[in-house]
């Protein structure tokens, strides 16, 4: 990959990482926000579910618009919305206000992920997309490591609201990168402005496509496990296990490192293997490991060290599941429907992720068992989704 190409991938990775950064930076603040807003644990965790719900809804707009009008215009709109709503989060007076602002912040943030995947499909041939997706995951994967530590530092120095001032600055910086360095990747002769009804028909065709749904649901189930961990870990580690705020980011990032490592192995070592087989094996391994995670949580075996080890290997499996499912979804669907396919994939991933996050909040207890049980439930959903392929 040439130096200019690597720089473009770095920019696309940064745009795609906006949502993980927006999620992970504020995780250490959740217990403090609960106190400041005089809110319940469920109310604070619903702010994360609201973000994921917005992230599920946003792609419905960006996919058809990017297919019909090009990639850059909706990117400008999304990044502008992200910047403004980050400021709304900064000045939120109540948890209800904050929840609404987070919902719309997610709609802005999802532009980078949806359109970034479509731009990869525009710019690179199918045989290179898995390696490019692995590179995107390397940039994205830095977010779970860097963001909680940065969030903890900001909280200690300036309070939790400074996190959203930082996100507003990040959104403005991405607007500059977009304007200065990214060219339009979707040529006019491939654009198709189908209108609202046409967009609905395109989504309906994809929903009726068993191959699309099998791989999209497989990837969504894997990502739901990640969102379960993201939503539940601040309360499990900080409140239940008594982990200090300064140490939370390190533990959270260490557990997420397995996700990055697996993604790089997948893109650089396993890229010549059959993607479907790699995906299927990773799903079954995750199911076995998630079962072990529930047992660790139920018995408190090894304390925070035992729990972290179980989370590390279970979350690592997603590094094989997410990129392979994305390639299997996107590779056959280029040209005029790449944006729509990417949008629907994002909608499914984050709608299911929002359900997982809300579920963890509703069944919250002073234990790691609910978090581990939800991860296990979605790990079981992964292999079941691939059974759709047997009906084609």
Image: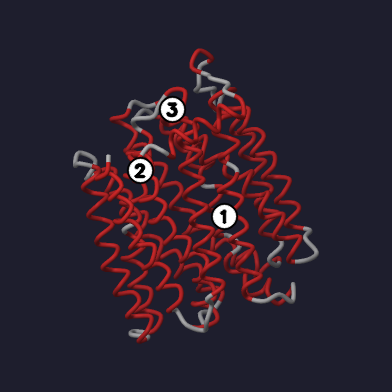
Residue wearing tag 3: 4
Name the residue located 33 percent from the left edge and 74 percent from the top edge. Answer: 293
Of residues 181 and 379, the one drawn nearer to the viewer in this rendering: 379
The CA span between labels 3 and 1 is 33 Å
Task: Using residue 260 as the reference point, say whether residue 167 is left or right of it.
Answer: right
**Earlier residue among tags 3 and 1:** 3
Q: Quadrant of residue 376?
A: bottom left
What colouring does the structure picture have?
secondary structure
Please say if 150 is above or below 107: below
Label 2 vs label 3, nearer the camera:
2
**Label 1 neighbourhood size at 10 Å, few (<14), some (14-19), many (20+)?**
many
Q: Residue at x 59, y 22 (%)?
A: 69
Residue farthest front in this picture: 391
Query: Which type of secondary structure does the marked residue at label 2 adopt?
Result: helix
2 or 1: tag closer to the N-terminus: 1
Q: List x then y, in percent, for residue 120.
A: 43, 31
Res 316 → quadrant: bottom left
Element at badge 1?
helix
Contact (Cβ within 8 Å) of mark 2 with mark 1? no
The residue under the point 49% across, 63% down is 356
- Number of other residues with Cα within 10 Å of mark 3, as a class: few under 14, some 14 to 19, many 20 or more: few
User: Disc 2, disc 3: CB below 8 Å?
Assistant: no
Question: What residue sits 34% from the left and 32% below the top?
Answer: 331
Pick the quarter of the image with the N terminus. top left
Which mark is on residue 134? 2
Which residue is tagged 1?
52
- Camera-nearest residue between 273 and 166: 273
Q: Is residue 181 left or right of residue 142?
A: right
């Amino acid at each position: 990959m040439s130096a200019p190409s690597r720089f473009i991938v770095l920019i696309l990775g940064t745009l795609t990482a906006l949502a993980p950064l927006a999620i992970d930076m504020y995780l250490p603040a959740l217990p403090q926000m609960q106190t400041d807003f005089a809110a319940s644990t469920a109310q604070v965790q619903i702010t994360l579910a609201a973000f994921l719900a917005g992230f599920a809804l946003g792609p419905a707009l960006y996919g058809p618009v990017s297919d019909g009008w090009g990639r850059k215009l909706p990117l400008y709109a999304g990044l502008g919305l992200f910047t403004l709503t980050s400021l709304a989060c900064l000045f939120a007076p109540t948890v209800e206000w904050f929840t609404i602002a987070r919902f719309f912040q997610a709609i802005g943030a999802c532009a980078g992920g949806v359109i970034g995947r479509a731009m990869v499909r525009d710019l690179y041939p199918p045989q290179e997309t898995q390696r490019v997706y692995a590179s995107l995951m390397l940039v994205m994967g830095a977010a779970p490591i860097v963001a909680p530590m940065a969030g903890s530092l900001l909280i200690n120095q300036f309070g939790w609201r400074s996190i959203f001032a930082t996100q507003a600055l990040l959104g403005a910086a991405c607007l500059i990168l977009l304007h200065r360095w990214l060219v339009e990747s979707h040529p006019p002769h491939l654009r198709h402005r189908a209108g609202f009804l046409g967009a609905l028909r395109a989504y309906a065709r994809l929903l009726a496509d068993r191959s699309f749904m099998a791989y999209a649901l497989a990837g969504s189930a894997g990502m739901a496990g990640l969102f379960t961990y993201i939503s539940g870990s601040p309360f499990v580690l900080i409140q239940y296990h008594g982990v200090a705020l300064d140490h939370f980011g390190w533990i959270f990032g260490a557990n997420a490192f397995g996700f990055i490592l697996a993604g790089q192995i997948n893109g650089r070592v396993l890229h010549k293997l059959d993607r479907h087989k790699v995906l299927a094996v990773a799903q079954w391994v995750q199911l076995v490991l998630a079962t072990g995670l529930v047992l660790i949580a139920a018995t408190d075996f090894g304390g925070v060290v035992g729990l972290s080890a179980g989370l590390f290997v279970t979350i690592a499996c997603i590094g094989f599941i997410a990129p392979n499912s994305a390639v299997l979804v996107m590779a056959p669907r280029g040209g005029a429907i790449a944006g729509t396919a990417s949008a629907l994939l994002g909608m499914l991933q984050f709608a299911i992720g929002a359900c997982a996050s809300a579920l963890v909040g509703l069944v919250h207890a002073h234990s790691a068992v609910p978090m581990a049980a939800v991860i296990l439930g979605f790990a079981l959903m992964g292999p079941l989704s691939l059974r759709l392929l047997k009906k084609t």
